[in-house]
Image (tube, rainbow, N blue to C red):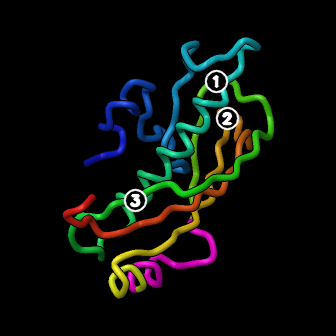
Amino acid sequence: MHIIDLPFNQLIGLSVSDNPEYFLMLTNDNKYTNHVKTVHAAALFALAEGTCGHFLLTKFDGIEGDVFPLLRKSEVKYKKPAIGKIYSKVQLVNDTIESFTSNFIEKSRALMLLKVELFDENGVLVFQGDFEWFVSKVTNSQ
């Protein structure tokens, strides 16, 4: 599965970045704007959350079987008005992919903290957020 194939992400037009410096993007489209003609806060949050999902799906090849990630909490800050095409970056906080994978394999569950930053076409930081994920193996009860 690819994160941009999810129905909601298709609805909002989430796509892989056309700039290799970034992860995902929202194109410059009026459908994302709010009453003051900037990119709506909900669209920015959706890009950030989708970026986390894309990171989870692409960075953990060492994890066998079905994985069930759930967003537990987030703390975000809207830094500047966002206009035009918006790009995302993501990084794992206070951990490494190897140690997370090892912990996950040992316990079949783990917490992950991701920092997401969103930038406009000029490279201006418009949003930053911390996203805590609970990741577990799929069981028959889920």
Q: CA distance from mark 1 to mark 3?
A: 30 Å
Q: Which mark is residue 97?
A: none
- Numbered-mark total: 3
Q: CA distance from mark 1 to mark 2?
A: 7 Å
Type of residue at label 2? Asp
Residue 91 located within the stretch drawn in magenta: no
Residue drawn at (58%, 20%), measured in percent from left and top?
32
Classify mark 3: residues with Cα within 10 Å, few (<14), some (14-19) or many (20+).
some
Q: Is residue 124 visible?
A: no
Which residue range is magenta in the image? 92-102
Residue drawn at (74%, 43%), measured in percent from left and top?
125
Is residue 66 found left or right of 127 in the rendered image? Answer: left
Q: Which residue is mark 2?
A: 120
**Which of the marked residues, 2 or 3, is nearer the chain's N terminus?**
3
Residue drawn at (52%, 46%), measured in percent from left and top?
49
Is residue 18 found left or right of 116 in the rendered image? Answer: left
Type of residue at label 1? Gly
Q: Which residue is mark 1?
A: 84
**Which of the marked residues, 1 or 3, is nearer the chain's N terminus?**
3
SS at circle 2: strand
